[in-house]
Every structure is written in C-alpha cells, then in structure tokens.
Amino acid sequence: MTNNSKVLVVDDDDAMRMTVAANIESEGYVVVEAADGESALALAREHPDIEVVVSDVRMPGIDGVEMFLRLKNVRDVPVILVSAYTNEDRVVAAREHGVHAVMQKPLEPTRLMRVIEGALKRPNVLVVDDDPAHLTTLVGALQSCGLRVLSADSGQRALSLAREQPVDVVVLDLLMPDKDGLETLRELRAMQRPPAVIIISGAADTEMLIDSSRGGAYTTLRKPVDVHELLRVIVRLRSAD
C-alpha cells in the first residue's frame, strides 16, 4: 500500500511512539515524530502537509490536550488523542472542543488505521432541522468548535447532501414536514456507506423514538440540544470507526 499522507505521532514514551509510528508507516503513510507537545507544535508549523496528528495525552510540559487546543489556532488538522484514562477531565474538555477522536490504550493497530483513514477524509457533520433558528444555532456552535458542518432544512435536502459530500455523522430532527426524520433515517441507513445518525427531538412521542432506535439511530438527544453532549457523542462515534 502507498499513501503520501503525512501523520504526526506525539508521545514522550520513546518505545510507544516508535511502535505507533512503525505501525502507521507499515500502511504506507509518511510519519514524523515528536517527543512532547512543544516539539509537536513546532513540527506542525514546519510541515504544512501534516494531515493527521496522533498524540498521547499525558506528557510533561504541554500535554496532548493543551497541544490540541493550541494547534487549533495554528492549523486546521484533525487530532486523535490516545489515553489510558479516556474519562478524565482533560480528555472530556478535548471532546467538547472538537477533537476528532479519543482512543484508549492499549491501541489496536487495525482500529487506529481505520480512525486515521476516517480523519483523512475530512468528513462533515450534517445537521438537519426545519426550524431555522435551531438549525443556525446548532451549526454555529459546532463550527465554533472546529467541526466541518453542513446544514439542511429538510429530509430530501439532507439526502442530497449526504450523497454529494463525505458525511460521517448526521444530526437529524425527528419531526419535519414532508419527509420526516424516520423516513430520512431509513434512506440514510440504506446508503452504500451509511453515516451514523443522531436523532434530536423535542417531541414526547415514545413510539417514534423507539422506531428511530430500531431503524439504526445511534442515540437520541432532546431539544434544546446540549452542544457539549452532542460533541461528546460525535467524538465517540468517530473514535469507534
């Protein structure tokens, strides 16, 4: 396999860093390495062709989360964080600021490669809602966290966008006129490469919510949507590719 994409691997543990780098290189990627967050930021500035960063969280000096937050101000590049403690406060904060994925140690190489490949596609999150105010608010909040976001005000428009552009997560309103959320969900899940679907709803119709779960929705969030909770779900989905 050959691949010209460049991946930055960051870890203060030399053995771990070299092992991860070797696994990625074996798949044909170009790899550069950094032993700490400060060096990683310098390399990201020096190498504008770096397309993905894989970083340990716990490092002396600038840790992986701080490196990710600073990198957001320098480069638009997806960051995959690796930690043995994926529920610690620092990692939760990274999820809420738009990190691409969080993976738990010990890393499984095949799964890591799937997540890297997903990050390289630079996929979009598609938000679908016929309520203009809620749509605008949700899209703006996700974009402010660094996510690439598409929007649609109808099920039909959502399906068209999902067929035209790379979309890995759809945030889908349940109650919409014409083509409702359940019908849109069925058509999304029938696509050749179906995106994950998060249902959002202000309705109390338990039967519809059950139907959405049976139809393949990953989870349901109540309106008004807590953006931090939504971000955590998106990161969880991308981390499980």
Image: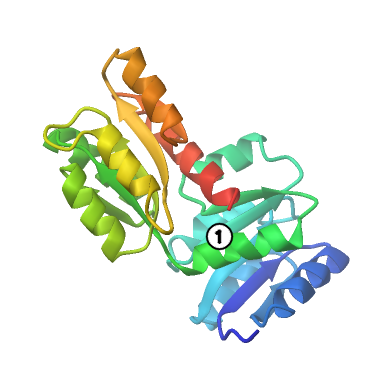
Looking at the rendered structure, the number of numbered marks drawn on it comes to: 1
The furthest residue to the right: 15
Image location (x, y in percent) of residue 56: 71, 56
Q: Residue at x 35, y 14 (%)?
A: 206
- Residue at (47% x, 36% y) in the render: 218
Q: Amino acid at mark 1?
A: Val
Q: Residue at x 40, y 37 (%)?
A: 198
Residue closer to the observer: 63 or 120: 120
Give the colouring mode of the picture: rainbow
Residue 180 vertical position relative to residue 72 in the rendered view, above or below: above
- Judging by the rendered image, the residue that carries numbered circle 1 is 79
Other residues around mark 1 within 10 Å, as few (<14) / some (14–19) / many (≥20): many
Q: Secondary structure at mark 1?
A: strand
195 vs 223, left or right, is right
Left or right side of 5 for 25 = right
From this viewpoint, is residue 232 visible? yes
Residue at horizontal 41 percent and vertical 59 percent from the top: 192
Q: Nearer the viewer, residue 68 or 193?
A: 193
Residue 127 sits in quarter? top left
Q: Position of residue 75 (x, y in %)?
A: 45, 68
The front one of 216 and 141 is: 216
Residue 236, given in percent of the width and then of the height, sits at 55, 42
Say which quarter of the image contains residue 7: bottom right
Q: Would residue 173 be seen by someone viewing this image from the given angle? A: no
The quarter of the image holding the N terminus is bottom right
Q: Is residue 113 above or below residue 131?
A: below
Report which quarter residue 37 is drawn in. bottom right
Give left or right: position of 104 versus 146.
Answer: right
Q: Position of residue 176 (x, y in %)?
A: 17, 31
